[in-house]
Amino acid sequence: MTVRQDQLKNGFRIVSEHMPGLQSAAIGIWVTAGGRHERIEQNGIAHFLEHMAFKGTERRSALQIAEAIEDVGGYINAYTSREVTAYYARVLKDDVALAMDVIGDIVLNPVFDPREIEVERGVILQEIGQAYDTPDDVIFDWLQEQSYHDQPLGRTILGPTERVSAFSREDLSGFVSEHYGPEQMILSAAGAVDHDALMKMAEKMFGHLQPRKGLIAEAARFTGGEARQQKDLEQAHFALAFESPGYRDDAIYTAQIYSTALGGGMSSRLFQEVRETRGLCYTIFAQTGAYADTGTTTIYAGTSADQVGELATITIDEMKRAADDMNPEEVARARAQMKAGMLMGLESPSNRAERLARLVQIWGDVPPLEETIAKIDAVSTVDVRDFAERLAISAPAALALYGPVSGAPTLAKLQERRAA
């Protein structure tokens, strides 16, 4: 498999990887415009724009967009994150040009029909309402807000209902003008693809765009804080976040190995101690996520009202114990899980295309896979223990609680336990 990368004169980037033996391909446009690129009055507009891309272009109606891909057995979708918006499709190899044409059309030529805006506004308001009814969605939004208080990175991707209710056609067009320049776009494809053919299609479709300077996102500052809401639910939802490295910092590999060993699987410390030994919960996990300039290691669990306090204190105790006695076997197991998860995921052309786009966004290049594996292998037990100690004792923290949580300790009490 060979990665190839090119750039048009206007800054539009193309990256692809041919995967021999496949009869299908994944192809998409990744735009470096997500939730953290919004001004406060724009909160939710990147996600609204993603929805509107499928509601009609100058050449196709909303139904024709869906039919064009589904008539050939493919699928098309999109998502908005805090740092990118992606529009992508999966099709058979003979339909790559069709997928490229449809994706380019929805990115470049949305009509923003006022009637469709109102229809989709209603859909998004329903989506927001559904999120409010999903406790583990709510708690992670609150945790993000407390981690990055009063910053774009701390705001919800969906946006508040009052903002979404007020967005106009001009607001949508304005966000496109600000953020959808050729230098903010990456065409990524993997599977049964021909890079030279992709280059010709990209030049024809995107080569006319004029370069424009993208707006720089506000630098992130992990603030920490606490959010809790008492509500009559079956379970108390508990989530902790700790400041961790961004994805441009090689320490991200240490953080990911640590969170896997702590709470990344059935053999992890939190799963074994909190669930298997004490029976305090059904779900508990730890994970590390990263952005360009910051990251978070997150622990989540759901438990009963009378056990949330015990669960919270045991979680801190297990974090502190990991700093003292994390052993080489645990680190090796976590390292193997991390590598296997990455390599298994790359058997999918969709995952591979997304990885290529993200690496180009992060580094401007695609580092060899062997280089990434070498960095994972280079993480030592001492590295993991040192990271565990910082998280357990001194790293800035945020706490979110939702449900019957009157018996849960405050963040200040957990901080005292960390320092004890």
Image: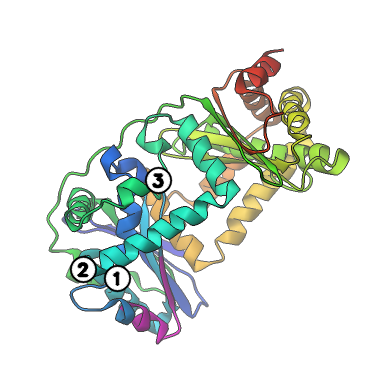
Question: Which mark is drawn over residue 82?
Answer: 3
Work out whether mark 1 precedes mark 2 in sequence or the reverse, and give the earlier one.
Answer: 1
The residue mark sitting in front, 3 or 1, is: 1
* In the image: residue 384, left or right of residue 398: right
Q: CA distance from mark 3 to mark 2?
A: 26 Å
* Placement of 55 over or under 134, stated as above or below: below
Q: Are marks 1 and 2 in contact (CB under 8 Å)?
A: yes
Tell me the SS state at disc 2. loop
Tell me the SS state at disc 3. loop
* Placement of 331 over or under 317, stated as above or below: below
* Placement of 149 over or under 157, stated as above or below: above
Give amino acid for label 3.
Answer: Arg
Give amino acid for label 2.
Answer: Asp
* In the image: residue 385, left or right of residue 145: right
Question: Which mark is drawn over residue 325?
Answer: none
Residue drawn at (24%, 79%) of the image: 60
Q: Which residue is mark 1?
A: 55
Q: Position of residue 66 (x, y in %)?
A: 36, 78
* Placement of 321 over or under 202, stated as above or below: above
Q: Which residues are magenta?
A: 65-77
Q: Is residue 5 visible?
A: no
Is 165 inside the magenta-drawn segment?
A: no
Q: Nearer the viewer, residue 336 or 82?
A: 82
Q: Nearer the viewer, residue 374 or 30?
A: 30
Q: Position of residue 314 (x, y in %)?
A: 77, 29
